[in-house]
Amino acid sequence: PKNFMISNGINAGEIKLSVQGVQQAVSYVHEYTEDPVTPESKWTSRVSSSREYLFTGLQSGIRIHGRTAVIGRKGQQVYSPVLARVVQ
């Protein structure tokens, strides 16, 4: 996916993950995990038909890492790069 971004939501404890829309996508999987990222990290995932998703209720001041996967019609799954941001 192109143009992956993590931005603050309007309220404290909100983080929005977004990617450029993909024409043949059937769904998007938006995920985040807390710092540090390790092979054992537990990713919180939300499946959506939208190219963006707002996670709420996060603890302000923690550093999170996010990524989004695009799911194609034949089950293809392509992840964005992982980016990090401190929750406001």
Image (cartoon, rainbow, N blue to C red):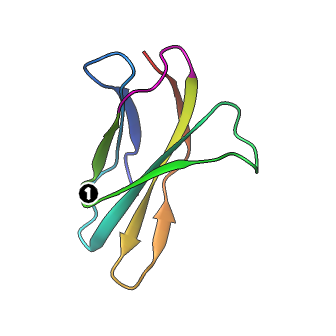
Residue assigned mark 1? 21
Query: Closest to the observer: 9 or 24?
Result: 9
Q: Quadrant of residue 12?
A: top left
Vertical placement of 82 versus 64: above or below? Answer: below
Q: Residue at x 27, y 74 (%)?
A: 24
Q: For numbered disc 1, what is the local secondary structure?
A: loop
Q: Is residue 32 above or below residue 36?
A: below
Q: Where in the figure is residue 23, as x and y percent of width and height?
A: 23, 69
Which span is picked out in magenta? 56-62
Residue 39, position in %: x, y? Answer: 76, 50
x and y percent of residue 56 in the render? 35, 31
Residue 60 colored magenta? yes
Query: Image check: 87 left or right of 63?
Result: left
Numbered label tally: 1
Q: Where does the C terminus fall, quadrant-wise?
A: top left
Q: Is residue 68 above or below residue 5?
A: below
Outermost residue toward the front? 57
Q: Quadrant of the N terminus?
A: bottom left
Measured from the top left, where is residue 53 in percent x and y? 31, 44
Q: Judge from the rendering whether residue 74 lies leftward or rightward of residue 35; answer left or right.
A: left
Based on the picture, tell me whether residue 83 belongs to the magenta stretch.
Answer: no
Label 1 neighbourhood size at 10 Å, few (<14), some (14-19), many (20+)?
some
Identify the residue at the far bottom of this view: 74
Residue type at mark 1 is Gly
Q: Which residue lies at the image location 47% right of the left edge and 20% below the top edge?
A: 87
Q: Residue furthest right?
A: 39
- Residue at the location (24% across, 55% down)? 50
Q: Main secondary structure of the magenta part?
A: loop
